Image (tube, grey):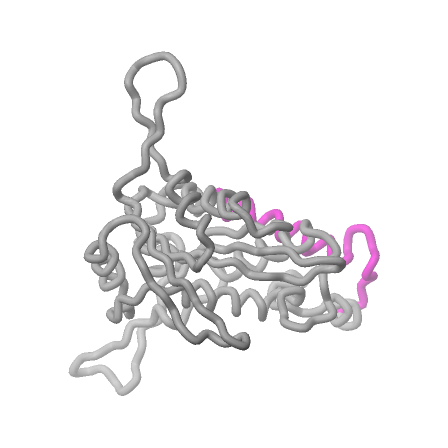
């Protein structure tokens, strides 16, 4: 039941296929989803949010989700070199608090502040990132140490311009760091030789979540009633994405004298890092 829930199967289909009670206390699909989502969050905190992930480049993006009687926002972060999902946050408002909560997950995962953060056009992204990765200056005096921004963090933004719901132009600029530093990080990622500032990988992750979570589908009638249900479903889908499914874009082509045509090596697991 957990497998079909993680892949976006509607509850009504599960009730018809497994013959369970939709409103039952312990065997209901909603109860299974809540327990699996809570376990996925604990596993994520135990294995990934331990400060051992060499991020390289991180892309953050927000997703607008329709719920009953309103709209909520879902923010996610992705480590581009390994396609590792770093966590997600659900909030009723798209403000600095949403971004701050997301960057808390990123900081718990990061082995250090030396990485590139690519965001969209929300101006609060860069401000909250600088605040989240500040370093404390220890002087030995009594009281709270002074916090200063770190020089290792690079921040870039890709601002999209729309006309009739279509992207007509993209403005890219570096917020923190130099253009040469950002280009060096982008070129060091396998398969990203074009060195373009973008959030395409995070947007592709959002499309994966849309396929796995029924409430995220466009023009759906399966809207959720509260944020807690959407949050546990997010952690269930994210845990399956990280630990259960390989990413095809991480495959390595075997080019050699004895290699056959279109012969690929299976992608490595996202975690633990190799």
Instruction: Return the residue nearer the eye: 134 or 176.
Output: 176
Please give left or right for residue 96 compared with residue 113 in the image.
right
Q: Is residue 40 visible?
A: no
Please give left or right for residue 239 compared with residue 173 in the image.
right
Instruction: Return the residue nearer the eye: 163 or 241.
Output: 163
Does the stretch in magenta take in 32? yes
Quarter of the rendering containing residue 67 = bottom right
Please give left or right for residue 122 compared with residue 258 in the image.
right
Residue drawn at (50%, 76%) of the image: 166
Range of magenta residues: 18-46
- Image: 33 above or below 47: below
Residue drawn at (63%, 57%) of the image: 233
Quarter of the rendering containing residue 220 = bottom right
In the image, farthest residue toward the front: 163
Residue drawn at (75%, 56%) of the image: 225
Residue 66: where, in percent of width, then height? 67, 62
Residue 94: where, in percent of width, then height? 57, 52
In the image, farthest residue toward the left: 257
Magenta segment's dominant SS is helix
| Image quarter of the C terminus | bottom left
Residue drawn at (33%, 43%) of the image: 111
Does the stretch in magenta take in 143? no
Label tally: 0
- Image: 70 above or below 140: below
């Amino acid at each position: 039941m957990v497998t079909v829930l993680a892949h976006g199967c509607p509850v009504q289909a599960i009730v018809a296929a497994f013959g369970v009670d939709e409103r039952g206390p312990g065997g209901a699909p909603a109860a299974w989803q809540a327990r699996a989502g809570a376990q996925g969050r604990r596993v994520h905190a135990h294995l990934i949010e331990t400060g051992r992930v060499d991020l390289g480049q991180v892309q953050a993006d927000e997703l607008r989700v329709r719920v009953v009687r309103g709209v909520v926002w879902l923010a996610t972060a992705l480590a581009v070199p390994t396609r590792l999902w770093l966590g997600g946050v659900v909030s009723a408002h798209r403000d600095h608090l949403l971004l701050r909560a997301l960057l808390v997950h990123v900081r718990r995962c990061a082995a250090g502040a030396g990485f590139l953060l690519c965001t969209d056009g929300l101006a609060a992204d860069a401000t909250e990132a600088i605040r989240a990765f500040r370093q404390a200056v220890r002087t030995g005096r009594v009281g709270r140490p002074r916090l200063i921004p770190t020089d290792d963090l690079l921040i870039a933004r890709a601002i999209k311009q729309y006309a009739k719901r279509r992207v007509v132009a993209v403005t890219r600029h570096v917020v923190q760091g130099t253009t040469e530093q950002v280009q060096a990080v982008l070129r060091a990622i396998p398969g990203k030789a074009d060195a373009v500032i973008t959030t395409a990988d995070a947007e592709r992750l959002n499309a994966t979540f849309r396929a796995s979570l029924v409430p995220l589908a466009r023009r759906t009638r399966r809207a959720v009633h509260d944020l807690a249900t959407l949050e546990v479903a997010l952690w269930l889908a994210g845990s399956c994405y990280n630990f259960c499914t390989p990413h095809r874009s991480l495959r390595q082509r075997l080019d050699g004298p004895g290699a056959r045509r279109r012969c690929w090596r299976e992608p490595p697991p996202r975690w633990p890092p190799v």
